[in-house]
Amino acid sequence: MSNKYKLHEFLDVDRLQTLQDNFSKSMMIALVVVDQDGVPVTRPSGFSDFCARSRMNETLERHCYDSDRAGGEAAMRAGKPVVYRCYCGFVEFAVPIMINNHYLGAFISGQVKVEEEKENSIPYILDNNTLWEANPWLSDLHYTTQRMPYERFESTAYTLLHVASYLVEQAHANNIQRELRQKEQELTAELRKRVEIERLLHEAEFKALSYQINPHFLFNVLNTIGRLAFLEEASRTETMVHDFADMMRYLLRKNNNGLITLGQEMNYVNCYMAIQKVRMNDRFDYVCDITDKYKDVVCPFLILQPLVENFFNYVVEPREMKSHLLLRATDDGKDVTIEITDNGDGISREDIENILSGDQNRQKGGIGIHNIKNRLQLLFGESYAMQITSPHKPMLGTTIKLRFPLVPA
């Protein structure tokens, strides 16, 4: 019999044991709690000498378990206490322990004799067998087992039914409250996560809309367009204007969930790099090793450009020598990894920690990187953290790694 509830998981067995011991002592009756298979989950209380000795014999113990299981199932079907005789003829009752029509187990009590006339009318729960009669010692113990008035025996069963119902209802109410608290906590966490995603997205969009790419960069673009228009007929100027228009369209894109495809993000980055190439000519080289295989991979909006912009702010602009930037994509069948590698002078371990922790006072550019790290983890999970590595030595550069799922969950 399958059951989504297990008695030992649903009820506190230690408290059940205390209740059982006290009830057995006060009612002067044997008592044990069995699970849905008839296997005891508590230690026997008040067992008769006959039953305690019988259960030391493996064969007789099996008969006892079979009787207990059959009694519990009969009580389950009846939905109330069932009085029966076990395989050795003792009068017992089973009180079902149930929740939402799911049978958890039963209180098995008895091991007594009642008035002979009444006793003869009580059916055996299983076929009667007399294996125990072969043992004279057990026969003597069976003969001396106590008798109890049937009326008292039956009222004890119904008293125990009310106690069992109260215990189960209380446990069920506690479980419901616990599940509700857990769901409330999960909902609160999900709402907090959603609010944080929206905040970070709005922050990224605001930076884009207010051109935190850098007002200085925008003026450079306009000046470069003006110079090109003056010096040549128009082809390069047209290309540059188109690249710039594509960038602006991307920045002004309405995106409510903060997600975009890697192909769209890379198109924006390539436009940005094309404009920078016109501005700076041979001051840098740029290699993009991201194939069309990854163009439909979902990634956060505006996640690569701030990192590429940092390349110009902290590698290209401060020095005269030629700088190099490599963007590469690989995958392991589950996630795609983007690596952004430059040949600058690197970042100290302390500054890396400050950047990733969001300590904006210690490192310029760190706010945007911290934003990217948080968006990755909020959108895809804690394991999708940004990684920054650097030997912090001249010309050995810095590598930033970002991961996205190949297929969104």
Image: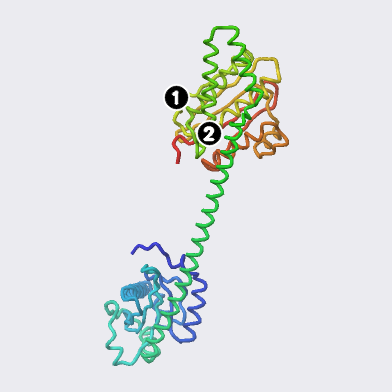
Q: Quadrant where the C terminus lies? A: top left
Which residue is the extreme one toward the right?
362
Above or below, 381 against 216 in this view is below
- Label 1, residues with CA under 10 Å away: few <14, some 14-19, many ≥20: few
Q: Is residue 102 left or right of residue 20?
A: left
Q: Position of residue 358 (x, y in %)?
A: 66, 39
The amino acid at mark 1 is Asp
Q: Position of residue 223 (x, y in %)?
A: 63, 16
Which residue lies under the disc numbered 1? 292
Q: Is residue 153 left or right of residue 241?
A: left
Q: Position of residue 121 (x, y in %)?
A: 27, 87
The amino acid at mark 2 is Phe
- Label 2, residues with CA under 10 Å away: few <14, some 14-19, many ≥20: many
| 199 and 337: which is toward the camera | 199
Task: Determine the CA span between mark 2 and mark 1.
Answer: 18 Å
Q: Position of residue 24 (x, y in %)?
A: 47, 83
What SS does tag 1 mark? helix
Residue 304 shows up from this direction: yes
Q: Is residue 24 left or right of residue 287?
A: left
Residue 63 shows up from this direction: no
Please identify, in this view, whether the residue under mark 2 or under mark 1 is nearer the observer.
Answer: 2
Q: Within the image, what quadrant is residue 237 found in?
A: top right
Q: Quadrant where the N terminus lies? A: bottom left
